[in-house]
Image (cartoon, coloured by chain):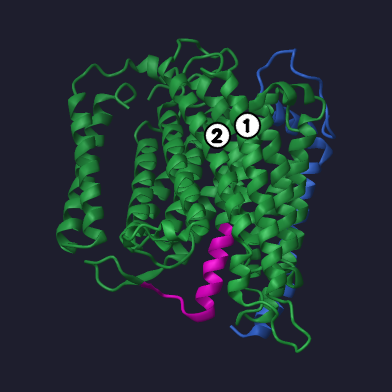
Chain colours: A green, B blue
Amino acid sequence: MRVSLTTNERQVAIGLSFALALMGLIMAAAARHGPMSVHGIMAMALGLGLVFRLGGVLYEDPPASPDRDGHYDDGPTRAGITMALIWGLIGMGVGVWVAALLYWPEATPPWAATSFGRLRPVHTTGVIFGFGGNALIATSFYVLQRTSRTRLADALSPWVVLIGFNLFCAWAVTGYLMGETQSKEYAEAEWYADLWLVLVWIVYFVLYIRTLARRAEPHIYVANWYYMAFILVVAMLHIVNNLALPVSLLGAKSFTIWSGVQDAMIQWWYGHNAVAFFLTSGFLGMLYYFLPVRSGRPIWSYRLSILSFWGITFFYIWVGSHHLHYTALPYWVQTLGMTFSVMLLVPSWASAGNALATLNGAWHKVRDDATLRFMFVAAVFYGLSTFEGSFLAIRPVNSLSHYTDWTIGHVHSGTLGWVAMIIFGAIYSLVPLLYGRETMAWPRAVEWHFWLAVSGTLIYVVSMWNAGITQGLMWRTYNPDGALAYSFLDSVRAMAPFYLLRTIGGALFLTGVVICTLNCRATMRSAGQRQDARDRPLAPQPAE
Amino acid sequence: MSHELLVYLAKTFGLIWMMGFFLIVVVRTYAPSRRAAMDRAARSILPDNPETEDRHGPDA
């Protein structure tokens, strides 16, 4: 941060940090106790820390302007990757812990903060927003600059986005531990954190548009379309689902303005599109950039990538109601969601097929290069989990699968097999480039990570398929008298071996992430001076 | 808004909007005159050297 900001930008940054500290102080003082005051103190500490950090370097020599403007602005990308790895360790570590608690429930510590119900959203928020979100922000800055051949529109707002987003994540997970929640899945954070995220997200979108407007390329590469859909639609979903009235402006508790089945519909319109636009759209942007670059081959069909972009964007918006089959939601709305879910298979498989066809003819590279193999496995799991998703959305199939662990297996086939794998592929491509090295510090460790990740995912997903189908069948087995043959507790007892296997699969996956983090740390510490010859030259910048 | 009105809108405006948008996208992406531009866009992220692999795929 220090070297990339001019003196003037440092002054503005100090002003913003001071404003953050002041906001935190007001929050803490107004709320007086409870989660909101703790969060105020956190914001104040962050703001003061930044004031001191920036103040200490305020009058150091600013970077020479031509030197700075001649390079891409990769500082925020480096920091974003580090944050993604830290959140990955937290989110997946908690995930393995709560998976173990399902097998050994008697190991639950006696404090409210460590109960399953509070830790579970720490896992989901930690991996989706912390790990996935930081990886998306970091790679979007990198891809945006390379495809546009221009620097980010200004040096300050990427840091506002990154630091602001991580404050949101920290507020969210610490809030859960203190018992603060909106009770909306993937939208548990309370009203003031939601408002904060809206601000951060507007800065993100404006930065993206301003940078695109400065691009030196006539065409906007397709990866940017996916990233923009991610930013824009997530803003829309987040705002509508989190419309809420706080009980008091001085406290954390709020109530949603939606009620009854409309609340359920809005929540799953949000929830499924969090899968669509947070966990798919942005990551397809990552895939469409890093897969061609790493394999050295242009995307198999660029036209198909555009067609599937519009297909995914238009169809996904409608599918949320498949989460509410056999509920009070009107039957036709359920059918609408089911129909669009099945139609969605077409653009999804078009994307997965396009990625695999790009690799066709370069299989020797997939065999030799574990980084490219991560991306190949990601494309395969993307194809598998989108097929499974369309299938599970069909009403009679859903009657067997819903409320069982099959859903958990499906989600993790998408998040471990697709989202995390493409993140690892992008990280292993980026970290050597960003730290001036030819390769990662420990190239063999990438192989280890790959096989741990693949075997962990397979063990996890297969055990949850078995668990879910077993549960679904036990719940619908009748004896000759027409009564249920099994009690609910029987089906819980039957899960023990699957829950143990799930914990083992998750632990293998987590081990891979630990290795990845150590490998990245070693690579960052032995940064070289190598300028990447393959990096796209920055277009000459007009004087500012 | 009543259910009947929603269905009416979905079957008229909704249908024309979605199918029309789809047709515009297909025509604009698959127009033969845009083939070269699409190919250039696909290659734009790769380094400009002749060693890059041969053209492949349906856009080639």
Q: List x then y, in percent, for residue A518.
A: 46, 27
Does residue A469 appear to the left or right of A101 in the view shown? right
Range shown magenta: A255-273
Quadrant for residue A512, please give it. Answer: top right
Q: Which mark is residue A450?
A: 1
Residue at image position (33%, 61%) is A110
- In primary-sequence order, the first of circles 1 and 2 is 1
Nearer-the-camera pick, A383 or A249:
A383
Q: Is-magenta flag for residue A264?
A: yes
Quadrant of res A526: top left
Q: Is residue A382 visible?
A: yes
State whether the magenta stretch is mostly helix, strand or loop: helix
Where is residue A399? Give x, y as percent: 71, 73
- SS for callout 1: helix
Residue A47 x/y as whole percent: 22, 42
Contact, mark 1 vs mark 2 (Cβ under 8 Å): yes
Task: Look at label 2 and name its amino acid.
Answer: Gly
The chain containing the residue under callout 2 comes to: A
> Which SS class for mark 2?
helix
The mark tally for this picture is 2
